[in-house]
Image: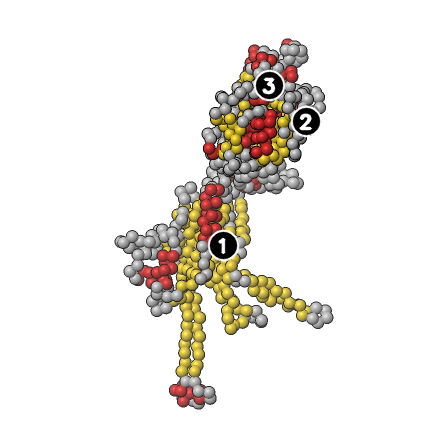
Amino acid sequence: MVSSAAHRRRWAGMHFRPVRPLLLCLASLGLASCNPPSSMLDATGQVDLTAKNPRKVARPDGQAKVKNQAGRYEIIPGMSAADFADGGGGDPPAGVGQLDDGKFTVNVDQASLGESAKLILGETLGFNYTIDPRVQGTVTLVSNRSLTGRELLSAYEAALRLAGAALIQSEGNYKVVALQEVLDGEMGTPDLGKGVSPGYGVNAIPLRYVSPASVMELLDGFMARSGTVRATKVGNMILIRGPSAERRQLVDVVMSFDVDWMRNQTSGLARLENARAEDVAGKVEQVFADDGAAAGPNALKVIPVPSINSLIVIARTRAKVNTAMNWIRRLDQESVDSPNYYVYAVQNGNAVDLARILNATFGSGGGGAGTTGDVAPDNQSMDVSIANDTSGQEPPQPDPQGSAEQLGKTDLQTGSTDGSSSGSSASTGSGGGLGGGTGGAGGDGSSSIRITPNPTNNTIVISATPKDYRKILATLRQMDAPSTQVLINTMIAEVSLNNQLRYGVQAYFETNNFAFALAGAKPATNGPIISPQFPGMNFLWGGISNPKVVVDALSGITNVRIVSSPSILVLENETATIKVGDQIPIQSQTAVTDGGNFVNSYEYRDTGVILKVKPRVSANGVVTIELGQELSAVQRDSSGVGDNPKFTQRSVTSKVSVNDQQTVLLGGLISGIEERARNTVPGADRVPILGNLIGTTDNNGQRTELIVFITPKIIRNGEEVARESQDLRNKMRNLSFD
């Protein structure tokens, strides 16, 4: 709803109210001494709506691409009263009559596009308009500050864009059409990230005393910090869009900066590179304290903004701002050797693992023998000589005579990992910290570098000089890359061994004319399906991408049963387990109570198909897989110790390296069952010699071989994950049990 002095109406579901001019102070940034409200979001124009048909953006994570602007010093000239004479709204679109110069306030709550267009375009601004019936959506537009007709039209146009619609002018009339049908305007393509939340919207803030350029420079650092909020200028208005919590912060900054005494002032924004903003602000104020610049009309004000490590300098003359900027530049250089504390929020890896590697690389120790000092009760003393690197690359190795030796063993059958470590640790100084001990000489950094992980919130606290921190940060960002995922496609088949396959599957392929090149065999000349890499026992190693080729070849001569065909997506250097089967109770203990009662204890054993895989991806696309495969079942017509059943088990544990999307075949797991049956006349088998002549003896045996196909596929980004998930859903839809 819109209200004005000459035009006020009341609609169902909409509320009109006049707005007084609101004078806001700059207390949140230290510019004034008054007490502002906790948030100024309610004192601005707000558009909160649901977008329709969002367009694809350049970056799928929804974050803006912002360059590092540390060390930039910018001057923004002030604006005089003449700059605001026209209301800052700009000229109306061509072909449209002069907009009403009156002031309007708007309060539209969840109105449809038709209702909002009738109220704003028709009833308030007096335009003829048409609406494409295909465009649907709702609009929530709130403004406590009065808007001119131009500003109201710009705000409504921005609201339509976020709702998937656009406002265009044609032959003197306005049309509300789908956004896809028009070229993107000043607001650009709506960027709504992964979805539409109720709090996503846009705030329209008409500026009174400062220029849009100065406000945009101030907001630039905050937008780089949040990554999900956007701001743009339309005439003399600032439009901020994004989630409500982050919009609220930027709105408070704009409203605090746009105050009366900022008129005709020149401001400067200095992004510090080395020093802390609070420290430099105090020193600059001391420099100008003696020349009378601390008070009066010619006062120089320096406001630190710690969140973006920047300083805002405000003065009436450009010369004074330039002088302050020069001092800031000098003071920023002086602090280059002073250690500071930095907190790095780990995005993808593990803070403890990354801190170990960084200490081994940049710590003060690392080469010779060292003794571990005392640490705080809440911290762990950690050996920084570690071989596991989440980035896929091994850290630099120290002198072998004093380096840590890692002895580890991985048990894929139980999933447990044990190991021992001996040698020296790279220290970060004497006492406390991560591995805080007195280390030997060596390492890549100085004794002033201290790196401590915080496992609670997965962050790393770094104490270093700005110069050293830039090196650490560059290394840390490379290591803290998104972990590569590997899709492991597995097929487990049981092959019945007959006379042709009496020596196993591999021997059969080697001795017959098939288009396969087996491990240890020469490739066929007519294009081998399987290409060997090196000889190996029970291995078929090659470039086939579909195990069905081998299964179809074996099905022509014997029975082949697909036991299981699991697929699992696992992170690099993580163990994934697939279990398909039953849990069988086994009596493990029997005890006698004081009353003479027997109490039995049972434990459960997994049977069926159990697969454990742990992949590691190299930079050249080779996947190294540690795998454990087990196929177990309860043996029929037999019993073990006591009343417990007897189990049959076939398992294989191996470590293989294959190229991306290359299939490796593991075989040789042969098992057999023999049965003997005697057929004779009842009672005749007891007669010596005659019983053997009358009866017959049948010897039946069944031998099977278990073969395992493993095909890894490297997935490096979210789009590939989504594509693979969709492929799996399509396969599930196409399943048929006819």
The first of marks 2 and 1 along the sequence is 2
The first of marks 3 and 1 along the sequence is 3
Residue behind mark 3: 101
Q: Secondary structure at mark 2?
A: loop
Q: Secondary structure at mark 3?
A: loop
Please give the name of the residue rendered at 54% of the width and 62% of the height, measured from the top-left corner.
582
| Quarter of the image that includes the C terminus | bottom left
Amino acid type of disc 2? Arg
Q: Secondary structure at mark 1?
A: strand
Residue behind mark 2: 17
Marks 3/1: CA–CA distance: 73 Å
Q: Is residue 48 visible?
A: no
Q: Nearer the viewer, residue 184 or 315?
A: 184
Based on the displayed image, in which of its 4 quarters is residue 456 positioned? top right
Residue behind mark 1: 612
Amino acid type of disc 1? Lys
Based on the displayed image, in which of its 4 quarters is residue 20 positioned? top right
Looking at the picture, does residue 392 appear above or below residue 682? above
Looking at the picture, does residue 611 appear above or below residue 452? below
Please give the name of the residue rendered at 49% of the width and 37% of the height, measured from the top-left corner.
60
Looking at the picture, does residue 686 appear above or below residue 281? below
Q: How many marks?
A: 3
Marks 2/3: CA–CA distance: 19 Å
Please give the name of the residue rendered at 56% of the width and 36% of the height, measured from the top-left corner.
137
Q: How is the image coloured?
A: secondary structure
Amino acid type of disc 3? Asp
Query: Dot 3, how many residues are within 10 Å of its Cα: few (below 14), some (14-19), or many (20+)?
Result: few
